Image (cartoon, rainbow, N blue to C red):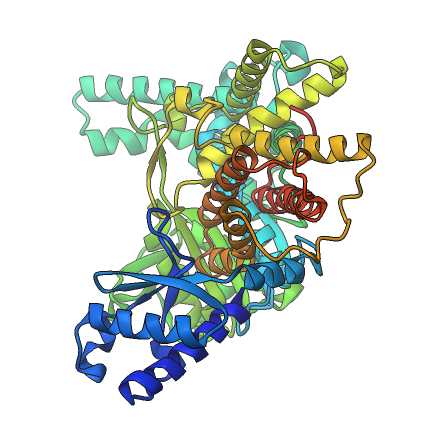
Amino acid sequence: MQQLENSLKTALQAAATAVFGVEIPAASLTLQPTRKEFVGSFTLVTFPLTKSFGKGPEQIGQALGEWLRANEPRVSGYNVVKGFLNLEVADSEWLQVFNQLCAQPAEAPVSLPDAPRNVVVEYSSPNTNKPLHLGHLRNNFLGYSVAEILKATGATVTKANLVNDRGIHICKSMIAYQRFGQGETPQSVGMKGDHLAGKYYVLFEKHYREEIRQLEAEGVATDVAKKSAPLMTEAQQMLQAWEAGDEDVVSLWRQMNGWVYEGFDETYRTIGVDFDKFYYESGTYLLGKERVEEGLQKGVFFKKENGSVWVDLQAEGLDEKLLLRADGTSVYITQDLGTAELKYQDFGYDSSIYVIADEQNYHMQVLQATLRKLGKPYAEAIHHLSYGMVDLPSGKMKSREGTVVDADELVRDVVAAAKAATLEKGKTEGLTDAELEELYHMLGLGALKYYLLKVDPKKRMLFNPEESVNLEGDTGPFIQYSHSRTAAVRRKAVELGVDETADWSTVTELHSADSELIQELARYSAVVAEAAKNLSPAVVAQYAYDLARNYNRFYAKVPIFAEADLAKRNLRLALSARTGEQIKAAFGLLGIQVPERM
């Protein structure tokens, strides 16, 4: 495809010289895909050429188009719409493009010069005081997909998960369990361990607010009440005891975290994400403290009168930032300093991507600026993939109030919806019960992942439960169905004894549906390159939808097995097969599986 574009640009340069006597650099010529409502394959915007050529944009388009049609065999026709020259490409060129595509696998690496080659993508990063929820799902799906997209460009990618397993929020769940747990375990109550910990996090907040209201009723100022409420005081004391290595506190911490890890692992398996390396805040915060001490010795950090340690980033347009509390306990950024160094020691990355919601934009700016202050070589390699939060129709989700959409429950709901939709269509013949259950899970998870990934990561999104499980239209299951249709064509070819690799070399003319599908297939490498450059799975999602729609138009417009010209039949079988392979490859980059039957 790129070779064809380059050839057309060279021809346009020749046309400019021949018609207008003007030499123009290829870099000034931008060809873009012609919009669907117009005839053509590539469009040249002629407005920027008016000054150099001394003519109006439409006159330029007509003159260039006429010359190309007369002198360039790759161009079979043209049309001009105001300042846009739409070029029609000869069928012979599309046949050559398709031959080139078939010479390599659909999932062949895409070249991306000058891009980072050694990348760590950190995502998920859950707290061990609550189960994963809808917001975590967007994070996990984004991180996994970005890692897969970067792999598709030939980069070495490490998927990392930093588990936030210590801190005041963890102590809140622990204190509540001590107070109200009565020794219950996940086994004794039949509850996943992460859900059990989350239950006590919510209980802490409930009783903590009651204590605040009681203190306020006694005349205590709200700010003072929040700090002096007994539950909060106990949680802070527990954090100090944990950092001091108190055996009872550490034992409870290990027990509850163990429950949570088992729950997380089950969820990760269910949603189809994985990791190459786990880091734990409990194992990185001490190194972070060392970096704080290093900063004090270098004079780039400072202590306040109460003993707390800060960094002054006002010159960087930020503010003063707390790095270590007065009581010596670490804050979130303390461990971030340690983790950044550990990741660099382990992998020597030239890009470290943090998949973190945009609520942490300031925090990430502070982290990078602080590492620069310390003179760390990896400071410039840090990249924050900032994504928009997920809202509900009722408003913002809040874990401490229990107003979240639980990840496990949501997956069960979309799988159930997929099952109901499939049974309603009645297309389940020939599949065993086990195969059907696998299909329902594939469709449900496909619907959910596609819904969350088709939105640009930077955009805040509203989660509509009804839309998320809709299996029609711009949805994952529609694209999955399109793949199953290509698989059905391949099965029929086998039944008829037709070899899908049979020769089509005698084909010279294409139906418009053939050439349009080839053009769509040829866009794949450019799409992957764009998605990698922008760290946006939404680009791949949109492409998969466009390809599926294009294939269904192709399927409806032209005969395959009923085609009398055997060479054309063979070409369309190959087109169908390649489409299936490419849908599978594109959806693989999104972490979505595709069924052979549906």
Q: Give percent across and percent down for residue 316.
A: 28, 69
Q: Give percent across and percent down for residue 458.
A: 36, 48
Q: Give percent across and percent down for residue 517.
A: 54, 48
- At x 46%, y 24%, the residue is 472
Q: In the image, is residue 475 above or below residue 77?
A: above
Q: Quadrant of the image for the N terminus?
A: bottom right
- At x 45%, y 72%, the residue is 8
Of residues 62 and 293, the one drawn nearer to the viewer in this rendering? 62
Q: In the image, is residue 276 above or below residue 237?
A: below
Please identify the quarter of the rendering in which residue 192 is found.
top right
Using residue 100 as the reference point, say whether residue 175 is left or right of it: left
Q: In the image, is residue 76 above or below residue 495?
A: below
Using residue 82 as the reference point, say whether residue 425 is left or right of it: right
Q: Give percent across and percent down for residue 148.
A: 60, 51
From where the camera sits, is residue 261 visible? Answer: no
- At x 75%, y 31%, the residue is 491
